[in-house]
Amino acid sequence: QVQLVESGGGSVQAGGSLRLSCAASGYTASMYCMGWIRQAPGKEREGVANIDAGGGSTYYADSVKGRFTISRDNAKNTLYLQMDSLKSEDTAMYYCAKSMYGGSCSHRLKEFEYTDWGQGTQVTVSS
């Protein structure tokens, strides 16, 4: 059974940083492209960033490019999202997700391309 458990969310002022973590279990996480999705109040879920199985290729939403960095440690079955220069519009629930793609993912994934996700961690950025 796939389990994804996020941590690291919280409240921060604009311009600050947070690092999200996601512990994966129940499957061989190192074999799949994974990513982060977010949902702001009143908005649809948005694919924020994703990374291929080996960690060599990453893809970002235009809104976070240059500010967010996705990475993974396959030895620890853990996915990360480093968020810098946070803005109020980054306020959302952030979800770690496992994609339907084994190995590589050659584009920024949309919500329907993920098969499993965690319970989420709240990020609140105040201006």
Image (spheres, rainbow, N blue to C red):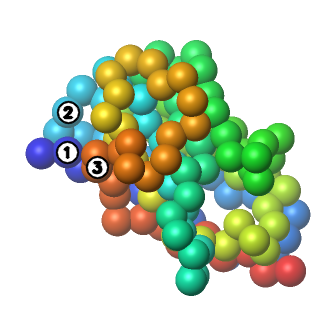
Q: Residues within 10 Å of mark 2 (few under 14, many from 20)?
A: few
Could you say which is closer to the camera, residue 103 or residue 44?
A: 44
Residue 35 percent coordinates (x, y):
48, 42
User: Quick check: can you spot residue 43?
Assistant: yes
Q: CA distance from mark 2 to mark 3?
A: 11 Å
Q: Earlier in the sequence, mark 2 or mark 1?
A: 1
Residue drawn at (81%, 67%) of the image: 87
> What's under tag 1, amino acid-wise?
Val
Quadrant of image for the N terminus: top left
- Residue 116: which disc? 3
User: Quick check: can you spot residue 10?
Assistant: no
Residue drawn at (58%, 16%) of the image: 56
Q: Secondary structure at mark 1?
A: loop
- Residue 27: which disc? 2
Circle 1 is placed at which residue position?
2
Could you say which is closer to the camera, residue 23 or residue 65?
A: 65
Q: Residues within 10 Å of mark 3 (few under 14, many from 20)?
A: some
Contact flag, marks 3 and 1 (Cβ < 8 Å):
yes
Contact flag, marks 2 and 1 (Cβ < 8 Å):
yes
Q: Earlier in the sequence, mark 2 or mark 3?
A: 2
Q: Secondary structure at mark 3?
A: strand
